[in-house]
Image: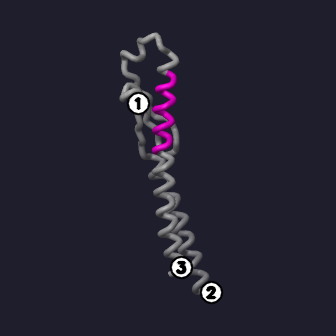
């Protein structure tokens, strides 16, 4: 590998790094939602895996079954986090594959 080829490879690596950073920012800004209890509890999380919002149907919040409510909230949050993680991992893997394929050319 000569100096020009090495320089080109280094430039591509820097471009890859910049693209990955931008993709991570875009994914962190996305919102993922999931529900439990037939939609009675909804959770929204970010691609950065932060809980953004919890919605609880008013009739459920006034009930006496606090344990059920806690379980439904946990289920909705966990489902939303799983959606976010899977989406982020899938998109990052696709970008990494395309970038690595570009290094070989």
Q: Secondary structure at mark 3?
A: loop
N-terminal-most mark, 2 or 1: 2
Task: Give the distance between the C-alpha atoms of the residues marked 3 and 1, in whole angstroms.
Answer: 45 Å
Position above or below: 37 against 22: above
Mark 1, residues whose alpha carbon is within 10 Å: few (<14), some, or many (≥20)? many
Numbered range of the magenta stretch: 70-83
Percent across and percent down for residue 6 are 61, 82
Q: Position of residue 91 (x, y in %)?
A: 46, 57
Q: Which residue is mark 2?
A: 3
Residue 44 is covered by the magenta coloring:
no
Q: Quadrant of the N terminus?
A: bottom right
Front residue of 17 and 41:
41
* Secondary structure predominantly adopted by residues drawn in magenta: helix
Name the residue furthest top.
64
Is 73 covered by the magenta stretch?
A: yes
- Residue appearing at x 56%, y 71% in the figure: 13
| Residue that numbered label 1 is attached to | 42
Identified at 42% across, 42% down, the residue is 31
Q: Earlier in the sequence, mark 3 or mark 1?
A: 1
**Label 2, label 1: how many angstroms apart (C-alpha)?**
56 Å
> Secondary structure beneath disc 1?
strand
Tell me if residue 12 comes above or below residue 78 in the rendering.
below
Query: Dot 2: few (<14), some (14–19), or many (≥20) neighbours within 10 Å?
Result: few
Say if 87 sits above or below 79 in the image: below
Q: Which residue is mark 3?
A: 104
């Amino acid at each position: 590998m000569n100096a020009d080829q090495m320089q080109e490879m280094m430039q591509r690596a820097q471009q890859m790094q910049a693209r990955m950073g931008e993709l991570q920012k875009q994914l962190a800004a996305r919102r993922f939602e999931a529900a439990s209890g037939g939609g009675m509890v909804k959770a929204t999380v970010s691609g950065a895996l932060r809980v953004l919002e919890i919605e609880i149907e008013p009739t459920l919040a006034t009930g006496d079954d606090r344990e059920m409510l806690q379980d439904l909230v946990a289920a909705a949050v966990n489902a939303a986090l799983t959606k976010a993680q899977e989406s982020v991992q899938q998109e990052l893997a696709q970008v990494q594959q395309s970038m690595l394929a570009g290094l070989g050319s």
